[in-house]
Image (cartoon, rainbow, N blue to C red):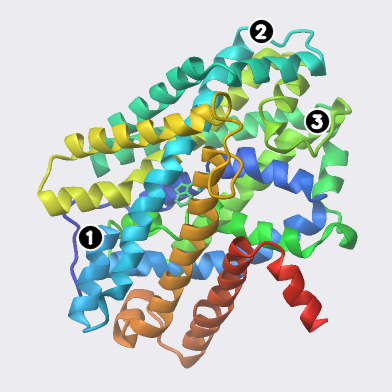
C-alpha cells in the first residue's frame, strides 16, 4: 500500500540530491574533527577496521531503516511515526522515536554550533598569519586564551547560527538544496587539494602505516564501543535526520543503493581527513593523541611549519566549516518540519525560533570552557559534556535501537517489501539478520556501557 508520493515540504530534485544532502548531513565535525582524534587516541589501524565494520553492519541497516520509514510516511519524523502506527494499527509508543529525535537535534545543534564557530574563527586566524613561526606553547596558549573569552566564542557561535537559520528558513529546495549544491562539491575539491598538499609534506607513508596497520594491543573493548558510537554519530543516525530527509526522496529510487553510496562517501571523507591531518602531524614530529585539541592546536601548528601553511591552513578550516554547516542544517529538519506541519507555521519563523533556542542552550556550552568549567552536572564534568553525553550516548543509541526494531519487527512486511524492493527470501533473511539482530544488539551494548561505565568490561569478564 502506498502511503503517499509527495511531501508537503518539497522533494529532492533527484536521487543525487538526496545522496548529497544525506552525505552533507553525515560529513561534518564528526569526520574531520572527531574521527582523526579518536583514531589517534586508540592507536590507529585496528580501530579503523572496527569502525569500518560498525559502519557496514550497524550503520547501513539503521540508515536504510530511517530512510524507508521516512519515505513511507513522507512527513516529519513525529508525524511519520504517527501515520505509520495509526495506519497499521500499532502502538503509539513508537512515536517516541520522533520526539526523542527533536530533542536530540536541538541539543546536538546547540553545541555543534559552538565548535563550528571555532572553525569559522580559525579560517580567519590561519589566513591572517597568527601562527607564523609558532611554537607548541604558543599554539596551546592561543587556543586556551580564545576559550577563556566567552563573548568572543559567542560571536562566532552566533554567526554560525545565523548562517544555519538563514539556509533552513528558505526551505528544502531553495535553502537546503542550494546550499548542498554549492558546498558539497566545494568540500570535495578542498579535500582533494589538501590531500595533494599533505601527500607532499613528507609524513604521508607514516600516516598510511599508522591508519592501516593492524595492531591487536590497541584494540580494547572500550575502543570497540567508541567505534560504534562514532559510526552512529558520523552517519547522523538515531534521531530522525535521515528519516526527515528520506521523506523527500522520490519513490523510484533504490534505498539500499543510495544508502551504500552515502555511507561510502562519509567513510571516504573520514579516511581522507585522517590522510590530510596525520601526514602533516608526523612531518613535524608532533603527537597524534592530543584529543579534541588535535584540530585547534596541533593542526594550526603543523600547517604553520610547512610552506604555504597559512593559506592551506585557512583552506582546511574552510573545509571544516562547509562540512559543519551542511550537518547543522540537517539537525534542525525533524523539529522544523514538525512545527511547520503542526502549526501550519511559516518555515522562516519556525527556523528563527529554533535557532534562538539552540543559540541560548549553546551559551551553556560556551561557558563550559570558561566561567562554568568547574561546574559538574549530573555526573558529567561540565554542561557541554552533559549535553554531549546525553544526546550522543543516550538519545542517539536509544533512537537507533527503536528505529531498527520498528523497521524489522513492527512495520508490516508489505510496506517493507514495497520500500526496499525485497522480493527474495534471501534478501529478507539478510535484512532481519542485520536490522533485527546485529544492529539492535550492538546498539544495546553501546547503550548499556554508556549508562553503566565499566559494565562492558564486567560482562566480558563473565563470558571469558
Ligand atoms: N553526522 C554529523 C557529523 O559527523 C553530525 C550530525 C548531523 C548528526 N546530523 C546529525 C549526528 C544527526 C547525529 C544525528 O558531524
Kindly report the distance in space between the C-alpha atoms of the residues bearing marks 3 and 2.
19 Å
Specify whether 142 is left or right of 355: right
Q: Which residue is mark 1?
A: 75
Residue 367: image tag: none
Q: Residues within 10 Å of mark 1 (few under 14, many from 20)?
A: many
Of marks 3 and 1, which one's residue comes earlier in the chain? Answer: 1
Q: Which residue is mark 3?
A: 281
Residue 129: image tag: 2
State the residue lying farthest toward the bottom.
425
Residue 38 pos. (x, y %): 71, 46
* Residue located at (63% from left, 46% from top): 270
Looking at the rendering, in which quadrant would you find the C terminus?
bottom right
* Residue located at (85% from left, 57% from top): 218
Element marked by disc 2: loop
Element marked by disc 3: helix
Looking at the rendering, in which quadrant would you find the N terminus?
bottom left
Q: Are marks 2 and 1 in contact (CB under 8 Å)?
A: no
- Please, is residue 321 above or below residue 266 in the view? above
Amino acid at each position: 500500500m502506498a502511503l503517499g508520493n509527495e511531501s508537503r515540504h518539497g522533494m529532492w530534485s533527484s536521487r543525487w540530491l538526496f545522496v548529497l544532502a544525506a552525505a552533507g548531513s553525515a560529513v561534518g565535525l564528526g569526520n574531520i574533527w572527531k574521527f582523526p582524534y579518536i583514531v589517534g587516541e586508540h592507536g590507529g589501524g585496528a580501530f579503523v577496521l572496527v569502525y569500518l565494520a560498525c559502519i557496514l553492519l550497524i550503520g547501513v541497516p539503521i540508515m536504510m531503516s530511517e530512510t524507508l520509514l521516512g519515505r513511507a510516511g513522507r512527513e516529519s519524523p513525529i508525524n511519520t511515526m504517527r501515520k505509520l502506527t495509526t495506519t497499521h494499527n500499532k502502538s503509539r509508543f513508537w512515536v517516541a522515536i520522533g520526539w526523542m529525535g527533536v530533542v536530540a537535534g536541538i541539543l546536538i545543534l546547540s553545541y555543534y554550533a559552538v565548535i563550528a564557530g571555532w572553525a569559522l574563527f580559525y579560517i580567519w586566524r590561519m589566513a591572517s598569519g597568527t601562527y607564523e613561526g609558532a611554537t607548541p606553547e604558543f599554539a596551546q596558549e592561543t587556543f586556551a586564551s580564545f576559550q577563556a573569552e566567552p563573548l568572543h566564542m559567542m560571536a562566532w557561535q552566533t554567526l554560525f547560527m545565523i548562517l544555519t537559520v538563514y539556509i533552513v528558513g528558505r526551505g528544502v529546495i531553495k535553502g537546503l538544496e542550494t546550499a548542498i549544491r554549492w558546498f558539497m562539491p566545494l568540500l570535495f575539491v578542498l579535500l582533494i587539494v589538501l590531500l595533494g598538499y599533505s601527500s607532499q609534506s613528507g609524513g604521508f607513508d607514516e600516516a598510511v602505516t599508522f591508519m592501516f596497520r593492524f595492531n591487536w594491543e590497541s584494540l580494547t573493548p572500550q575502543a570497540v564501543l567508541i567505534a560504534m558510537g562514532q559510526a552512529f554519530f558520523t552517519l547522523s543516525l538515531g534521531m530522525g535526520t535521515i528519516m526527515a530527509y528520506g521523506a523527500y526522496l522520490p519513490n523510484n529510487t533504490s534505498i539500499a543503493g543510495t544508502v551504500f553510496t552515502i555511507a561510502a562517501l562519509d567513510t571516504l571523507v573520514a579516511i581522507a581527513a585522517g590522510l590530510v591531518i596525520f601526514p602533516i602531524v608526523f612531518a613535524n614530529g608532533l603527537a597524534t593523541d592530543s584529543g579534541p585539541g588535535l584540530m585547534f592546536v596541533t593542526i594550526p601548528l603543523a600547517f604553520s611549519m610547512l610552506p604555504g601553511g597559512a593559506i592551506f591552513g585557512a583552506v582546511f578550516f574552510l573545509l571544516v566549516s562547509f562540512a559543519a554547516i551542511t550537518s547543522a542544517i540537517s539537525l534542525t529538519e525533524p523539529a522544523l518540519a514538525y512545527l511547520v506541519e503542526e502549526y501550519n507555521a511559516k518555515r522562516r519563523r519556525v527556523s528563527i525560533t529554533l535557532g534562538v533556542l539552540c543559540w541560548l542552550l549553546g551559551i551553556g556550552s560556551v561557558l563550559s570552557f570558561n566561567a562554568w568549567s568547574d561546574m559538574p552536572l549530573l555526573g558529567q564534568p561540565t554542561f557541554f559534556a552533559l549535553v554531549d553525553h546525553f544526546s550522543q550516548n543516550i538519545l542517539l543509541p536509544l533512537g537507533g535501537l527503536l528505529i531498527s526494531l520498528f523497521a524489522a519487527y513492527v512495520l508490516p512486511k508489505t510496506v517493507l517489501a514495497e520500500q526496499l524492493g525485497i522480493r527474495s527470501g534471501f534478501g529478507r533473511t539478510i535484512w532481519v539478520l542485520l536490522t533485527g539482530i546485529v544492529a539492535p544488539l550492538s546498539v544495546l551494548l553501546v547503550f548499556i556501557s554508556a549508562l553503566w561505565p565499566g559494565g562492558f568490561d564486567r560482562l566480558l569478564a563473565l563470558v571469558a
